[in-house]
Amino acid sequence: MATTDIVDIPPARPRKPVLLRRKTLRRILPWVVIIGIFVFWEIVVRAFGIEQFVLPAPSAIFESGWKWRWPILDNAWQTLMTTALGFLIAVIVGLLAGIAIGSSTLVYDSFYPALIGFNSIPKVAVVPILVIWFGVGTIPAIITAFLIAFFPILVNVAVGIATVEPELQDVLRALGASRWQVIRKVGLPRSMPYFFASLKVAITFAFVGTIVAETVASNKGIGNLMLVASSRFEVPLAFAGLLVTSVMGIGMYLVCTAIEGRMTGWAMRGADATMRGQG
Amino acid sequence: MNFVDLDRVSLRYGEDEDGTLALDRATLQVGTGEFVAVVGPSGCGKSTLMKVVTGLWPPSAGTVVVSGKEVARPLSIAGMAFQNPTLLPWRTTLANVMLPLEIVQPHCSRLKRERAAYESKARDLLALVGLKGFEDQFPWQLSGGMQQRASLCRALIHDPSLLMLDEPFASLDMFTREELWLALQNLWLARKPTVILVTHDLREAAFLSDRVLVMSARPGRIVAERVVELARPRTLDMTYEPYSVALVHALREHISAARSTVT
């Protein structure tokens, strides 16, 4: 058998890293899109001469927002706190209920249909009932935010725990692990990526819940502010309220993403991480 | 003395009489510190056998005795490794290997105080299978073969008296597989646990085990048994010597016979 030795291959020309350039671009692009939307909006409003009480131009919205900045801030703080509280309760209840439902087929089978039915109820319809029970104010808003936000958390945690690989369960059970140990060592950490993904959905849901409740039954908060503004035909102010709400939504979303990245970095290994690994 | 003793063990999936019969009056004995390989056509109930021995599934009939006691619930002494390495992606390799220590007594209660000692033990074990320097890497940063090595270490860290291996090398390429045979042989020679290895690679069975059991097609029962008379430690070259070749050939014939009885 003939063997050939291959020696002395000249090194190939090194390539420029594309990844770095793409990273800066990815950081700028969202801002470009947001500013683009506002510019487009402004142009459309001016070009077609749309009336301010139909669709105010961004410039008018910002102007009105600046003019009413103290009431807006005051109400935004109220909305933010209400949402955060409802969200917090949703996280605790969703996590605990998710663990219970995900770890036992019996609990899953018995509670899941009822939960689906409950989740199908439009939460707006519940607000008047909450008002009867708790009166007009912050409490119905907190409860609405909680009711609307806890379901996605529960479902995701339950799915994460229920889908632990059977082999892994066997490994642990053959070591004499109890059911709770399997959940703690494997089920819970495994469901964390699902859990944090659900938080991002839930926080935006919680804002919806709060604002809806504030619109229907409160005398404080951004929802109430927008209601009052539109009843006075201060449409730019109503839009300013919307804008503030989305800014708060984005802020909370980013907080959730930051926590997610810190807690479950292992589940989101990007292209660079894999390249580092195969050494 | 027999460490594992199965007496006419049957297992039927499903509760009624028409459920699939996976094991049919399987009888086998494995001595303490013995390395036994179980081979057979695919779907013959080899994996079922593992679950029954470790007590993960109760048998429908017959008795399973391990270490002198009848198995009624999952054993707490067995180490297991599967075709899929099933490492936990959120733990480093070292932390993955140390997982059993957090569960098995008496290690579980000692772990906090003697963390350093246990850690160095885990590092030694990883070094033995050639994973020195990868302790703090995450499983997804390792190749498939390295993950499988780590999985073997996890199965062995708590010095189990019984090691159950279910086709642990099936998904690896030939070279990696042979390397791991040697690694496994070293681990076994160093600690001498009782091993039951389920495999469909006859060379693997001949190289690693003291005794090879052949299972028939489903419903599985033990139809043949061959003792491997090769000195230890064995070398890979031995698998190409006439003795091994003849053994593999004979096993192959048994399996063909076992397959043709059904069809």
Image (tube, coloured by chain):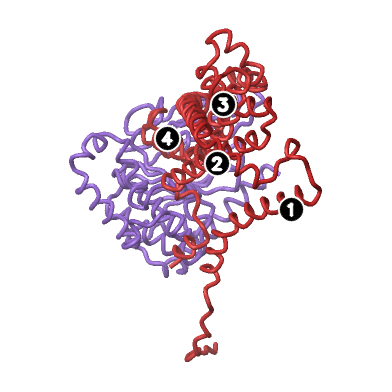
Chain colours: A red, B purple
Question: Can you identify the residue that label 2 sits on?
Answer: A66
Name which residue type carries label 4.
Thr
Which quadrant of the rendered structure holds the N terminus of chain B?
A: top left
Question: Can you identify the residue that label 1 sits on?
Answer: A43
Question: Can you identify the residue that label 4 sits on?
Answer: B54
On the question of residue B225 being in view, the answer is no
Image mark 1: chain: A
Residue drawn at x 42%, y 70% as measured from the top left: B237
Q: Earlier in the sequence, mark 3 or mark 1?
A: 1
Report the mark closest to the observer, 3 or 1.
Answer: 1
Image mark 4: chain: B
Q: Disc 4 and disc 3: Cα gap in Å?
A: 53 Å
Mark number for residue A210?
3
Residue drawn at x 76%, y 50% as measured from the top left: A46
On the question of residue B111 being in view, the answer is yes
Report the mark closest to the observer, 3 or 2.
Answer: 2
Name which residue type carries label 1.
Ile
Q: Looking at the picture, does residue A56 appear above or below residue B24?
A: below
- The answer to whether the residues at label 3 and label 1 have Cβ atoms under 8 Å apart is no
